[in-house]
């Protein structure tokens, strides 16, 4: 999740989001100037004007990209990614599901120990036919745009991606069955999100694929769809079998229900790629976090316990409770009608590695009182970890984005 994409100076002002910004590319010679021309297509220009200024600002704030690298990343965003967004939201038949507030684009700034210079973004390709009779669930573009993505991605390998798409994307008959079995309140279920990690000059492609529609079409649980498929991936699925079985066992009996909703892969050489299983809890308490991080006590190595200790230093800040929280205290979300709530856990599996790396994602817009508080809380969290320089860098970057 993006730590903070805009900043309101009034701490009582509600959170805003990039798709609600009415920003345009600046013509002045400032840090906000976008170094390439905007798209000519009016539909693409609509998306570009709302997304490109923020991406450009983050690339500037990261301080790790040469002018040539930044321009190249922006060209790919303009020429390949933006056209996949489809019809502008006001006229579109379907609403993007990627973010809490309905944006098809979610940038983020990755902060890890020793490296705070990687900008990433996730996007939901919808295409112009999304919501039509031919493509009711906006899945067709997940197949059709892969050849062009292959040409602009670094070290790309789509073998796993193609296998998962073939297993989970629904046929027209399955789409009709899924529609009949879906709750009436659910308008659409996503099939794929795509993402880029921009590591200096490289663009590493990632894919997030959903078994939920297949679940409604066939009756198979999302857990079974995920864990039955992982060992069958070729090549190296057999080397993922042991950690996948350990995770499956934990999720089947964990103290807080943790429902599988998505699987992600790195679209690189499968021998070097990760498989990430995403599952969500309704509770966001610290005790639930610790239980999941340790797989209910099944994974208590030094790295895991250090991760729990680190999380306890910052968790209250990430939930906008700077005075602290008790272990079992949870914070209610402001909107219960969306799936973007609780904690979304990413369980990372690597071929040949038994240990499961676990990350926790929080929808800050659900629990934080304002952008300014979000920025201050995250800066404090970085300082609590001893990352003072990263805290300063993040604060400068958030302030720059707020001026768009």
Image (tube, grey):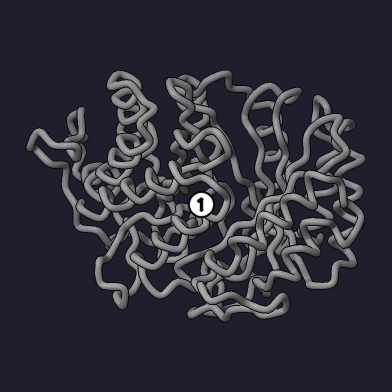
In front of the other: 16 or 290: 290
In front of the other: 259 or 347: 347
Q: How many marks?
A: 1
In front of the other: 180 or 395: 395
Residue 119 horizontal side relative to residue 186, left or right: left
Q: Is residue 125 visible?
A: no
Residue 45 vertical position relative to residue 96 in the rendered view, above or below: above
Residue 320 place in picture, x, y as percent: 49, 71
Residue 216 place in picture, x, y as percent: 71, 64
Q: Is residue 58 visible?
A: yes
Residue 144 vertical position relative to residue 287 in the rendered view, above or below: above
**Quarter of the view holding residue 45:** top left
Residue 64 horizontal side relative to residue 296, left or right: left
Q: At 67% from the left edge and 80% from the top edge, which residue is drawn?
A: 329
* Residue pointed to by mark 1: 382
In front of the other: 173 or 247: 247
Q: At 34% from the left edge and 41% from the top edge, which residue is drawn?
A: 58
Q: Farthest residue in the left direction? A: 28
Q: At 78% from the left edge and 34% from the top edge, which residue is drawn?
A: 350
Residue 274 vertical position relative to residue 255 in the rendered view, above or below: above
Residue 339 place in picture, x, y as percent: 57, 69
Q: At 88% from the left edge and 51% from the top edge, which residue is drawn?
A: 299
**Quarter of the view holding residue 369:** bottom left
Q: Judge the density around disc 1: few (<14), some (14-19), many (≥20) Cα neighbours within 10 Å.
A: many
Residue 196 vertical position relative to residue 15 in the rendered view, above or below: above
Residue 404 horizontal side relative to residue 339, left or right: left
Residue 74 place in picture, x, y as percent: 31, 31
Task: Determine whether the residue tagged by mark 1 lies in a helix, strand or loop.
Answer: helix
Residue 329 horizontal side relative to residue 134, left or right: right
């Amino acid at each position: 999740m993006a730590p903070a994409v805009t900043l309101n100076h009034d701490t009582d002002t509600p959170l805003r989001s990039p798709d609600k910004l009415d920003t345009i590319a600046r013509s002045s010679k400032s840090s906000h100037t976008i170094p390439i021309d905007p798209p000519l297509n009016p539909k693409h220009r609509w998306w570009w004007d709302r997304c490109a200024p923020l991406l450009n600002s983050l690339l500037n704030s990261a301080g790790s990209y040469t002018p040539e690298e930044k321009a190249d990343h922006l060209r790919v965003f303009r020429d390949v990614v933006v056209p996949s967004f489809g019809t502008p939201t006001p006229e579109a038949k379907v609403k993007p599901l990627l973010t809490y507030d309905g944006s098809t684009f979610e940038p983020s700034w990755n902060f890890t120990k020793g490296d705070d210079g990687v900008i990433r973004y996730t996007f939901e390709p919808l295409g112009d036919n999304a919501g039509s009779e031919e493509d009711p669930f906006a899945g067709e573009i997940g197949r059709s745009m892969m050849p062009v993505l292959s040409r602009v991605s670094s070290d790309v390998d789509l073998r796993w991606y193609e296998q998962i798409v073939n297993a989970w994307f629904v046929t027209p008959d399955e789409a009709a069955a899924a529609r009949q079995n879906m709750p009436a309140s659910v308008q659409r279920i996503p099939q794929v999100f795509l993402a880029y990690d921009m590591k200096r000059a490289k663009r590493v492609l990632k894919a997030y694929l959903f078994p939920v529609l297949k679940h409604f079409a066939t009756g198979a649980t999302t857990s079974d769809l995920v864990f039955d498929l992982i060992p069958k991936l070729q090549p190296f699925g057999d080397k993922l079998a042991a950690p996948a079985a350990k995770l499956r066992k934990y999720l089947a009996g964990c103290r807080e229900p943790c429902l599988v909703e998505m699987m992600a892969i790195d679209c690189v050489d499968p021998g070097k790629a990760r498989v990430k299983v995403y599952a969500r809890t309704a509770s966001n308490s610290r005790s639930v976090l610790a239980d999941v991080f340790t797989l209910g006590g099944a994974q208590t190595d030094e790295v895991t316990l250090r991760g729990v200790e680190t999380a306890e230093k910052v968790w209250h800040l990430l939930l906008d409770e700077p005075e602290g929280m008790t272990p079992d205290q949870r914070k209610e979300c402001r909107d219960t009608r969306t799936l973007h709530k609780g904690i979304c856990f990413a369980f990372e599996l690597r071929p040949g590695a038994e240990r499961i790396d676990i990350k926790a994602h929080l929808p800050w817009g659900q629990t934080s009182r304002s952008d300014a508080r979000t920025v201050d809380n995250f800066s404090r969290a970085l300082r609590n970890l001893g990352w003072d320089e990263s805290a300063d860098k993040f604060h400068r970057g958030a302030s720059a984005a707020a001026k768009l």
